[in-house]
Amino acid sequence: MGAVKTKRMPRAVREQQMLDAAVQIFGQRGYMAASMDDIAELAGVSKPLVYLYLNSKDDLFTACIRREATALLAAVRLGVVPELPADRQLWDGLLAFFTHTAGHPDAWRVLHLHARTHGERFAAEVTALRAEIVAFVTGLIAAAARDAHRDPDLPEREVAGLAEALVGAAESLAAWANATPGVTARQTTATLMNFAWAGLGSLMEGRQWTPPPPDQP
Amino acid sequence: MGAVKTKRMPRAVREQQMLDAAVQIFGQRGYMAASMDDIAELAGVSKPLVYLYLNSKDDLFTACIRREATALLAAVRLGVVPELPADRQLWDGLLAFFTHTAGHPDAWRVLHLHARTHGERFAAEVTALRAEIVAFVTGLIAAAARDAHRDPDLPEREVAGLAEALVGAAESLAAWANATPGVTARQTTATLMNFAWAGLGSLMEGRQWTPPPPDQP
Amino acid sequence: MGAVKTKRMPRAVREQQMLDAAVQIFGQRGYMAASMDDIAELAGVSKPLVYLYLNSKDDLFTACIRREATALLAAVRLGVVPELPADRQLWDGLLAFFTHTAGHPDAWRVLHLHARTHGERFAAEVTALRAEIVAFVTGLIAAAARDAHRDPDLPEREVAGLAEALVGAAESLAAWANATPGVTARQTTATLMNFAWAGLGSLMEGRQWTPPPPDQP
Amino acid sequence: MGAVKTKRMPRAVREQQMLDAAVQIFGQRGYMAASMDDIAELAGVSKPLVYLYLNSKDDLFTACIRREATALLAAVRLGVVPELPADRQLWDGLLAFFTHTAGHPDAWRVLHLHARTHGERFAAEVTALRAEIVAFVTGLIAAAARDAHRDPDLPEREVAGLAEALVGAAESLAAWANATPGVTARQTTATLMNFAWAGLGSLMEGRQWTPPPPDQP
DNA sequence: CATGAATGAGTGTTCATTCAT
DNA sequence: GATGAATGAACACTCATTCAT
């Protein structure tokens, strides 16, 4: 399945081939278990060339993360139309998200699983991506609250927690959907939308669940 | 900072020390990046002893997973009283879950992050744990639906998806809470309860979010 | 198949059990591949006891060699009656030899294969055994020559070479017979006796064979 | 004493250097006692290069056996002229054999001692070599019998036993000659030829030897 | 531009050997 | 007398990385 061995390609193209191979191997085996030999072979180039272009395993992994994070973010942004209502924006964003992760499972494994597992340097790259998505969702929740003329001072911390939970659920569902054959991105999106929106909506009509008091020893 | 070097301990005790060290190192570095040398050193024993008692890195990792999965499940079961109403059971279960993961962050990383990343053999161990939790949550959702005299035939597939989303959200929140200083287990539980319960509750009063039709090209 | 675990046996008996186990393991696996753990387990004792009685792997191996060399030599001596004619003595000696090696294949492997393969110290033990056997055979050949009133001054060096060849053939045949099912000691003895005594040349009417001159460059 | 450290040699050359070193170390120490570190050092290369070219200790040993078996067989074949009479062929073959084993004592130890001691996989390689030599000798014995117009139906089994004994004697003598200083290949050949062709019985006027009846208990 | 040749440093694993009880 | 507990030292093998060409 490796790239056809063609000679004399421009550097930019060769680099993309290497990144393609690297994402595939990293995604399937993880950072440590992936070997530069295998990546070079899959990319159809010699190992020294990989080092010439990408410097080190570390840098190669970073480049993978950056490329895939950028691509995922772009896909989500492209799917959303800011003029539409908040709920529609959320739907479109989630659909774009699940569609992209379903189309690039190795990339998603790199971002979701492996990048967070090997040192702060890599985790930080992903954290940035995640922060942007959480911010986007946070904005939508706040907007929705405003639209509903409800509780305009919903505490920030609470909103952050809700956004976090929503994004977390989305991430988990993406992995689950990739591992479960026969689940479409639309289905996954619908499940999460129902779960999230109905929940948030009822929140804004004032019904709320009251925790029991802590145990008194 | 490893265990104080005490000599001549009975096997059972030494084994627990080794597992403690292994969970810590595996949790922080991942399976591949963890070295048996480091684990042995942290446990305060020589490497051959680790092999004598735990056989191999593979078996050691499996033993970690099993011990921590069992402990987590026990903690959740201990926190729940089956006679109480479904919502209270869910609260108690989540609180026990977040309390345990907050108290054993490395163990949680092993189960949530690393065990799923290195071969089916390990993943299967965690899948069993997860399946039990999802089943528990699924039961609660169904029970709640019954209690509300609502929609007693809520489609199974839908319930499974919801449970999956809820558990996914919980897992993600556990990792997030561990990485975010100053968040208590109670707060995390409250956030997720609000998110989940209000959402599910409004579902059961029939309000539902309707997806837009697919794009027509 | 290990010895039954009986407690409190006199030292001499325990030692023999250990040597039995050691000969079996050494014979089947060779010196280096044999592990003290396996020997101790097969002997039904704890490892420290093996060290207490036999000191080291080296010494244990030496003890095996000595015991088996002594036993083999004793068997051959017991089979021979010095008053009988030389050819009958040779027959009886060979028969005793092949009978013993067939009955103790592991011991024979230790002596023939493994002892010569691991350092001069061990090889020397076997060389002593072999020297005794070669001397015995040399004596028989000389005696036979005398009995036949033939060539009484057959050069010593020549006799030594012949004895060496005969013993070498016997050693090889012992290994071959052990590895070939259905061959009895009597058959092996007969083959070698015919070969040695009659010779191939007798097939050709007793003509002696004369070597060609060396190549003249 | 190792090869002079020359850098950047073509692969084929390096491989031969490694095999040279491996034969030497394996021959002197045996398979298990030989360490890849020592072989690499003697070959004047780093250990990873040995693995890159020869894959594993197992494969390295196999490669040694194959190379040396092929070389020994080639030497014997080169020494024999099929048009000459059978006895002359045997002489030439034995001389070539002893000359080669004397010139490559480590190789002979690998083939004769170590290859037969470590697992069927290795033993099989040598068995093939041996089978070819035994077949060659068997053919010569049969041819000699035919030439002499004698006993043309000498039973096959008997011929096989004789050939086995002859080859066994040759193998043992090769080891003995290598361990005994001052013995030339010609002398060894002459001894064995006399032994085999004339036989000890010719000393005694061609009398055939008759085995005594088994003991009656 | 591209690569065959080469390695330092580390991995998991095993084994002969010894105490303390 | 006998053993469970423990280890120093080594081994086969791998990998990220770099020159010389």
Image: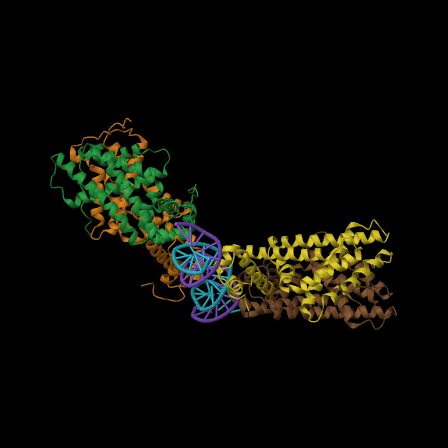
Chain colours: A brown, B yellow, C green, D orange, E cyan, F purple
The residue depicted at 70 percent of the width and 62 percent of the height is: B98
Q: Is residue D206 visible?
A: yes
Return the x and y of residue E11 as percentages of the image width and height: 51, 62
Q: Quadrant of residue D13?
A: bottom left
- Give x and y (percent) for residue D189: 22, 45
Q: Quadrant of residue A81?
A: bottom right
Judged left or right of residue A52, residue B140 is: right
Decide if residue D139 is on the left or right side of residue A84: left
Image vertical order of residue D24 relative to residue B191, above or below? above
Would you identify the image quadrant in which residue D34 lies?
Answer: bottom left
Which residue is at the front of the view, A74 or B184?
Answer: B184
Residue D165 place in picture, x, y as percent: 28, 39
C190 over D63 or under it: above or below: above
Q: Residue at x 63, y 55 (%)?
A: B123
**Who is closer to the viewer here, B182 or A204?**
B182
* Of the pair A98 and B137, the residue shown nearer to us: B137
Q: Is residue D112 visible?
A: no
Relative placement, left or right, of D86 versus A133 is: left
E19 with respect to B108 (left or right)? left
- Residue in the foreground of this view, choosing between D148 and C128: C128
Q: Position of residue C84 (x, y in %)?
A: 18, 32
Classify the position of the N terminus of chain A by image quarter. bottom right
Q: Is residue C196 above or below residue D18?
A: above
